[in-house]
Structure formats: C-alpha cells, structure tokens
Image (cartoon, rainbow, N blue to C red):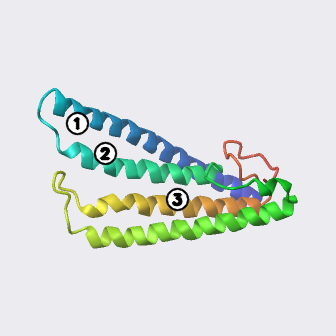
Amino acid sequence: MRSTMLRAAHFTGALATFSLWASGIGLVLMTVFITWQVFGRFVLNDTPTWTESVSVIIMGWFIFLGAAVGIREGYHLSFDVMLHILPRRVRKILHTVSDTVVIAFGGGMAGFGLQLAQQTWSSTIPNVGWPVGVTYLALVFGGFLMVLFSIERVLRRFAGLSTVRFADIDNTDGD
C-alpha cells in the first residue's frame, strides 16, 4: 500500500500544483480586471461592465482550489492545541475523524454545487452572457478536490506515511 500511495501522491501532487498555479493566475487576472474597471471608470469615464462579474467568478475558483490544496498540505484551519498532549495513536485517530468530516463537507459542496449549477444553467449573467451555473462550478471542483485530498490523507496515514506538507512525500514519520 505504501508504494501505491507514493505513486498516487505524484498524481495528486501534480493536481495540487496545477490548482495552485490556476489560483495564482486567477488572483492576478482578478487584480488586472478590477484595475481595468477602476481605470475605465475614473480615467476613461467608461466603465467596463464585465470585469466585476468575471472577477467574482474567478475569485470563487481561486478560493476553493486554494482551500482544497490547503487541506492536502495540512494548512487548513484546525484547533489542535489539545492534540499536542495526547498520545500519538489518539492523535492519528482524531486526525482521521477530522479528515472524514472534511470528506463529508467536500462531498456536500460538490453535490449541492452541482445541483445549483444545473438549476441555474438556463439563466445567463447579463453583462457577460455566460450561464449562471458557471459560478457554481468552482464549488463542484473545489469540493471534489477536498474529497480526493482528504481521502489521500486518510490512506497515507494507514500506510504509515506523513500527511503533513506533502512537498516531502517520502517522509515516513506518520504524522
């Protein structure tokens, strides 16, 4: 199982890297679009109407993709003060419970996000002409990645591999 998880980590690592790059590019694009909107409004006296809608859509993507990668890398929000005084075995159990809750949450995000996207696909965003459902696709992909990365964390833990900061995928301290 160990060697399988190490091979899988290369795939999910590439997926996480792609997600981070997409998030970073989205953040830069959003900044450019909002800057263009401000320039157009105050300098050209002609506000581009599409920039705000597209920026909000991009913001959803970089937030949810970045959150999923944060879960994979162990940077997500947690209250772990008590965990430092517990025995290692109990810590592993509690981390697995936490990852299981994240799997349920991510699954809910993906499932309900898909329902929202389907129900709003026939409506269009007026100033862009895109289906409103596009705005909810970030929930679907972000939720899917949260589920995938959390399952990976649980399986890595059972294989005796590290789940903290996957940059070092060969670290076998089991935390």
Dot 1 surroundings within 10 Å: few (below 14), some, or many (20 or more)? many
Task: Tell whether 166 sits left or right of 30.
Answer: right
**Label 1 or label 3, whichever comes before in sequence order:** 1
Looking at the rendered structure, the secondary structure element under dot 1 is helix
Looking at the rendered structure, the secondary structure element under dot 2 is helix
Q: Where does label 2 land, which residue?
A: 55
Residue 116 image offset from top left, x and y in percent: 34, 70
Give the camera-side residue of 63 and 141: 63
Residue 13 image offset from top left, x and y in percent: 59, 48
Residue positioned 17% across, 40% down in the render = 48
Give the camera-side residue of 3 and 138: 138
Residue reaching furthest top?
Answer: 43
> Do callouts 1 and 3 mark residues in contact (Cβ within 8 Å)?
no
Quarter of the picture holding the N terminus: bottom right
Circle 1 or circle 3, nearest the eye: 1
CA gap, disc 3 and disc 2: 22 Å
Circle 3 or circle 2, nearest the eye: 2
Q: Which amino acid does label 1 sit on?
A: Gln
> Do callouts 2 and 1 mark residues in contact (Cβ within 8 Å)?
yes
**Label 2 or label 1, whichever comes before in sequence order:** 1
In this rendering, the count of numbered labels is 3
Q: Where does label 3 land, which residue?
A: 145
Task: Tell whether 15 sits left or right of 3.
Answer: left
Dot 3 surroundings within 10 Å: few (below 14), some, or many (20 or more)? many
Residue reaching furthest right?
Answer: 87
* Residue 77 shows up from this direction: yes
Residue positioned 43% across, 44% down in the render = 22
Residue positioned 49% across, 71% down in the render = 108
Q: Which amino acid does label 2 sit on?
A: Ser
Q: Where does label 1 land, which residue?
A: 37
